[in-house]
């Protein structure tokens, strides 16, 4: 157990996505003790669910692996998964934080051998794949999950299946009596890196999500293209598994719109351009249409945009999509937009529609138990002594910018340990 | 140190079910006679670790531990016995029993080989002692450039208790911000122009006791290495020196040369000005026409003047949309009847700047027009006439305005200067041998003037911007301890520039904290090993100095390498490059890998059990191999994997070691290289590929086929494909036939 002084030199990072991870490892490597509190059973957040990063088209698991290695090799970092912050009291340099640990029903003895899954038949929606498929109720969240430890879903607790899982474990790692518990941490500063949620696409009724088959969101498209996704990486129509010959991307689905979110979500243009490369890689002849208001490919990303747009099968139409409807005759989807260039309405009939839904800050729907100021959309505004925000909790950001922002937040958090 | 080796074999997770544990222990005992060899049902349990601890602390006094259990990627904290104990993790779980059929002879042989390899490895490892130079190590930071990014870096580092030396070439701090009339909003609600607040920021750093400011000063020279730098600062004709530990470079950008924008009327009409001139005009009080001094009643702001244009700048300069909206507003605030036209291609006001855009749209005197300027002329009254194509109305429009403001993009100061290629001179000794190694280009921008063998500045990655892995390794350059912030690194808006200042300062702080403890920085942060050069055998071939991706090694006038351990990232590229094999780490060396290779048991030809080696990058390929086990795919039982810090550590002697031993082939698994390289050490994988291209020579000498050696550029996410790749290599070796050196 560390002494009192060391405890108050500690930093709490709330959220184990790419921003939280970065704040944590950067602060720890600068010589501070850090706690990471993550509500999911694994670290990596939404980045763990991405297929590739733009513009390099490299796998995010590579970047996560190096960060997990930094965590494994650094005794200064302590991680709590399936955990949430219940209360923060005190002041800069001396906060008391109550953390609730939810039961995983699997303890540190777990070796990830997988024996516990043998007798389990109950399936639950697979959150990792945005519920596009199902997994067993005893599961490893994904192949490269960190920590690499199984989870037992509460759905089967108290059933025979749970008992079977317990009996199958040779290492006494299954603990079905686990209860939620609270712990208290003393920290000098708190960094909220609570990230974002994809905006609820069902709110835009005209865009057909949830009513028109084969209309998906951009985050689902990441899973559809990922080799460990619900279709083993094959981009097919999710409703019937049929091949895709044409795709429409609908930009600003929920962003830059006073009826939904009035800010720009920053990443969606590049995300759709990147997803266009997923389509072209698998289906070189597929037609891709991108309906946009402005293509916001800032800085060096411009060159990525230029490259993707140069493909003769990629069409960019400046116009806001008004309607997405099923065409029962062809089984396709009709996307109708106003082409601002020609003034006329334009239509595309496609197999798959990807809504570039924006980033809603997690705090829009889940305020945090601390003295934090928000703007009207739920982003954190400003900072208070010892209370900071990093990444998409502050503003909509891509991964590279989030990493830089989170590094800057690490320094803020360290300043609080010095100022005491 | 005299090794007392303890071998601990775990039986859990299927290892005991799949392998003959007694036979495995017999390999250790009979061939290596370790001090102890024990097995355990559940080695990572408290009781299991206790067994090891007792041997470390007890009469056995074990000081070298071989844990034959799961992958080193898991249970790391459990099997951590401190720096004085040499440790190797033999991966029997993921890379043997989880990817091989249970109970087979070949599975057993694989496990036995890995045990041999692990025990051999600890025999060649020594405990690490951190690098501690005689000279005192400095934890002060040098910040070069006193604009928004540099001031922020200085202020933020000072607030964390670090001393900062801030050097600015102009007579006063503030940089570009000093030239602004108003600033685009930096804070919520992002709707209005703000008063320029750089004055407050300047005052704060000037009054901070932790910050020493040099204005009107430039860097004459920077000698040394992280924690050991001597910065020679030239000010008023004098040179002063400061000892510093790490460097933040925040030297900013300059406007693109408007002289090249004649197609937009610059230089053709007096009333076509740049956005820089516009700030000057607005600062003076009234925005007037250059031609006649009359207050401007109408102006057109032309965006992407030079940016997003393959003829000029291929990138987007990121801030021009926001800054032009701001300048248009200057005009509207000056005269409520004035007309401001903003001609844009895409309005790029990301994130919260959408609010600013919307606020400007609500101003009825603002005309925001999508289009491209196709012609610029002047009428008899010196009004400027613009032809605009590609408008939303679909037709060409003509605009007649008092003045045109070109939103010239930004060019990093790092890209301004003579470009030099940093190989060896053609007539220089060693040049012919090194001709195959692509030389880095350095732009002599006169920002740092590093006294480095590999040039005075950091090499650019792209369009002159000196960053490296810009997604995952924020602020990193290819020079250890030197971090780039602000628009020198990429075109940035205000909030991102401020972020950059703080973030780069943190990286610099991290560098001095780790380095002063003798530890490496990212990506091997915390590593206490460093390369030792056995100079007696050095032939001054210069390979190590030229190939080091981080410019860590200097040279004396005779061509002897002068290593700088605190610049070193511990990748081992120099070790791979050295033909004399004189570069070694205490726990990683050419000899060590050679001995591991030699420890593999190679069956005779008539056993029909081929063997091949896999040299795997431990950052991506090794985890991918683990994943193959985790998803329970099978790979060829003939493979034997040796992890490497980076494939760039490949020394060609290992090819000879492997093939002369009778092993049938070598598969190298490295990272993707090229423009979008994924190698954590930038060039390692590429250098391995280059070295390999010369392996034909070795193979010819041994009278062997070149198909026996192959390099695959693997992504970590390709693990589901990996069994196929490995098995295809195995099949190819079958076709080539057995290595004729078997049994020699």
Image (cartoon, rainbow, N blue to C red):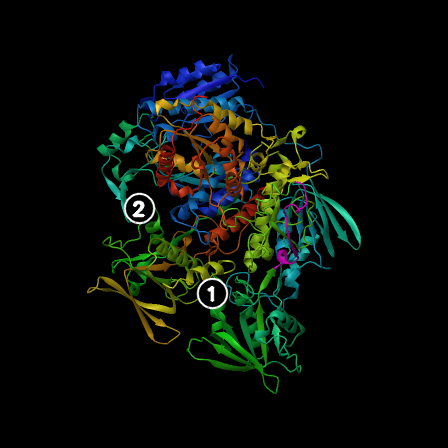
Q: Circle 2 is placed at which residue position?
A: A232
- Within 10 Å of disc 2 (Cα), the crowding (few <14, some 14-19, many 20+) is few
Mark 1 crowdedness (10 Å alpha carbons): few <14, some 14-19, many ≥20: many
Alpha carbon distance from label 1 to label 2: 38 Å
Tell me the quadrant of the picture where the C terminus of chain A can be found: top right
One can see residue B166 in this view: yes
Q: Position of residue B126 (x, y in %)?
A: 57, 24
Q: Is B724 located above or below residue B43 in the figure?
A: below
Q: Is residue A291 above or below residue B505?
A: below
Residue B8 rendering spot, x and y as whole percentages: 43, 20
Q: Dot 1 falls on which chain?
A: B
- Measuring from the top left, give residue B328's x and y in whole percent: 55, 73
Q: Nearer the viewer, mark 1 or mark 2?
A: 2
Q: Which residues are magenta?
A: B412-429
**Helix, strand or loop status at disc 1:** helix
Chain letter for the residue marked with disc 2 in the picture: A
Secondary structure, mark 2, is loop
Q: Which residue is mark 1?
A: B354
- Do circles 1 and 2 both sit on a common chain? no
Q: Which mark is residue A33?
A: none
């Amino acid at each position: 157990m560390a002494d009192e002084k060391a405890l108050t030199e500690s930093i709490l990072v709330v959220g184990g996505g790419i921003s939280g991870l970065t704040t944590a490892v950067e602060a720890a490597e600068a010589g501070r003790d850090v706690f990471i509190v993550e509500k999911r059973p694994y670290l990596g957040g939404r980045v763990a669910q991405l297929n590739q990063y733009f513009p390099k088209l490299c796998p995010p698991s590579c970047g996560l692996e190096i960060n997990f290695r930094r965590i494994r090799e650094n005794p200064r970092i302590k991680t709590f998964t399936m955990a949430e912050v219940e209360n923060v009291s005190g002041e800069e340099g001396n906060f008391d934080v109550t953390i609730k640990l939810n039961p995983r029903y699997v303890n540190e003895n777990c070796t990830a051998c997988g024996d516990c899954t043998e007798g389990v038949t109950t399936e639950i929606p697979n959150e990792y794949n945005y519920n596009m498929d199902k997994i067993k109720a005893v599961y490893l969240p994904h192949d490269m999950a960190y920590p690499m430890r199984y989870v037992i879903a509460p759905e089967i607790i108290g059933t025979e299946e749970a008992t079977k899982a317990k009996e199958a474990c040779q290492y006494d790692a299954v603990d079905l009596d686990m209860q939620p518990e609270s712990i208290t941490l003393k920290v000098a500063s708190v960094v909220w890196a609570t990230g974002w949620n994809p905006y609820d696409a069902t709110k835009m009724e005209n865009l057909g999500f949830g009513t028109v088959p084969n209309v998906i969101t951009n985050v689902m498209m990441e899973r559809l293209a990922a080799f460990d996704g619900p279709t083993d990486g094959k981009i097919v129509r999710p409703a019937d598994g049929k091949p895709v010959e044409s795709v429409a991307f609908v930009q600003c689905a929920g962003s830059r719109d006073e009826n939904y979110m009035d800010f720009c979500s920053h990443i969606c243009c590049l995300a759709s351009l990147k997803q266009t490369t997923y389509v072209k890689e698998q289906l070189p002849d597929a037609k891709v249409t991108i309906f946009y208001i402005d293509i916001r490919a800032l800085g060096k990303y411009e060159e990525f945009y230029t490259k993707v747009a140069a493909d003769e099968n990629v069409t960019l139409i400046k116009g806001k999509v008004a309607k997405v409807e099923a065409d029962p005759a062809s089984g396709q989807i009709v996307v109708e937009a106003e082409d601002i260039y020609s003034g006329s309405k334009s239509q595309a009939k496609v197999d798959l529609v990807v809504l570039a839904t924006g980033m809603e800050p997690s705090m829009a729907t889940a305020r945090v138990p601390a003295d934090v100021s928000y703007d009207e959309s739920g982003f954190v505004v400003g900072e208070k002594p010892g209370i900071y925000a990093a990444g998409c909790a502050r503003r909509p950001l891509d991964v590279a910018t989030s990493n830089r922002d989170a590094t800057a937040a690490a320094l803020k958090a360290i300043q609080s340990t010095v100022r005491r | 140190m005299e090794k007392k080796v303890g071998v601990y074999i775990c039986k859990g997770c299927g290892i005991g079910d799949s392998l003959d544990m007694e036979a495995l222990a017999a390999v250790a005992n009979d061939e290596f006679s370790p001090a102890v060899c024990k097995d355990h049902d559940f080695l990572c349990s408290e009781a299991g670790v206790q067994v090891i601890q007792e041997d470390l602390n007890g009469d056995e006094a074990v000081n070298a531990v071989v844990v034959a259990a799961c992958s080193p990627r898991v249970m790391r904290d459990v099997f951590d016995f401190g720096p004085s104990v040499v440790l190797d993790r033999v991966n029997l779980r993921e890379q043997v029993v989880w990817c091989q059929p249970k109970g087979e002879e070949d599975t057993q042989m694989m496990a036995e080989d890995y045990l041999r390899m692990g025990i051999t490895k600890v025999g060649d490892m020594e405990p690490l002692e951190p690098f501690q130079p005689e000279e005192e190590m400095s934890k002060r930071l040098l910040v070069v450039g006193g604009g928004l990014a540099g001031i922020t870096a200085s202020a933020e580092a000072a607030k964390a208790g670090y001393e900062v030396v801030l050097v600015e070439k102009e007579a006063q701090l503030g940089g570009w911000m000093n030239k602004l009339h108003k600033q685009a909003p930096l804070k919520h609600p992002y709707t209005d122009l703000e008063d320029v607040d750089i004055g407050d920021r300047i005052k704060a750093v000037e009054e901070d006791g932790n910050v020493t400011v040099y204005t009107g000063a430039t860097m004459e020279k920077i000698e040394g290495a992280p924690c050991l730098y001597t910065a020679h600062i030239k000010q008023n004709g004098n040179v002063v020196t400061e000892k510093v530990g790490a460097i933040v470079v925040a030297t900013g950008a300059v406007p693109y040369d408007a002289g090249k924008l004649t197609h937009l009327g610059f230089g053709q009409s007096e009333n076509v000005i740049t956005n820089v001139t516009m700030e000057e005009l607005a600062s003076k009080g009234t925005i007037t026409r250059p031609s006649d001094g009359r207050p401007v009643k109408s102006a057109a702001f032309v965006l992407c003047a030079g940016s997003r244009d393959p003829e000029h700048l291929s990138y987007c300069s990121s801030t021009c949309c926001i800054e032009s909206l701001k300048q248009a507003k200057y005009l509207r605030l000056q005269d409520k009847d004035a007309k401001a036209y903003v001609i844009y291609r895409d309005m790029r006001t990301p994130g919260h700047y959408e609010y600013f855009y919307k606020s400007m749209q609500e101003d009825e005197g603002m005309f925001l027009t999508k289009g491209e300027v196709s012609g610029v002329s002047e009428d008899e009254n010196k009004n400027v006439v613009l032809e605009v194509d590609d408008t939303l109305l679909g037709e060409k429009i003509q605009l007649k305005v008092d003045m045109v403001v070109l939103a010239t993009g930004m060019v990093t100061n790092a890209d301004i200067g003579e470009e030099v290629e940093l190989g060896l001179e053609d007539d220089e000794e060693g040049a012919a041998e090194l001709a195959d190694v692509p030389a880095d280009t350095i732009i002599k921008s006169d920002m740092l003037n590093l006294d480095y063998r590999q040039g005075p500045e950091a090499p650019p990655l792209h369009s002159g911007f000196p960053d490296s892995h810009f997604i995952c390794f924020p602020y990193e350059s290819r020079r250890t301890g030197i971090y780039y912030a602000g628009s020198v690194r990429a075109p940035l808006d205000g909030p991102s520039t401020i972020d950059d200042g703080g973030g780069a300062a943190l990286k610099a702080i991290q560098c001095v904290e780790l380095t002063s403890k003798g530890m490496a920085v990212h990506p091997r942060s915390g590593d206490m090993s460093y390369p030792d050069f056995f100079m007696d055998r050095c032939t001054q071939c210069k390979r190590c100095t030229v190939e080091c991706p981080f410019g860590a090694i200097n040279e004396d006038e005779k061509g002897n390498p002068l290593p700088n351990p605190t610049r070193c990232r511990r990748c081992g590229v120099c070790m791979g490059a050295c033909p004399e094999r004189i570069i070694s780490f205490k726990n990683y060396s050419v000899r060590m890998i050679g001995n591991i290779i030699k420890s593999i048991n190679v069956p005779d030809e008539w056993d029909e059990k081929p063997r091949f080696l896999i040299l795997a990058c431990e950052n991506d390929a090794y985890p991918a191999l683990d994943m193959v086990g985790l998803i329970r795919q099978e790979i060829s039982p003939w493979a034997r994997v040796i992890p490497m810090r980076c494939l760039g550590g490949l020394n060609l002697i290992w090819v000879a070691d492997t093939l002369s031993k009778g092993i049938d082939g070598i598969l190298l698994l490295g990272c993707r290289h090229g423009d979008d390289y994924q190698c954590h050490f930038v060039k390692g994988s590429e250098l391995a590929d280059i070295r390999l291209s010369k392996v034909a020579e070795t193979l010819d000498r041994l009278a062997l086929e070149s198909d026996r050696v192959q390099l695959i550029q693997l992504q970590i996410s390709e693990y589901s494909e990996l069994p196929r790749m490995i098995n295809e290599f195995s099949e190819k070796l079958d076709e080539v036939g057995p290595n004729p050196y078997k049994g020699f």
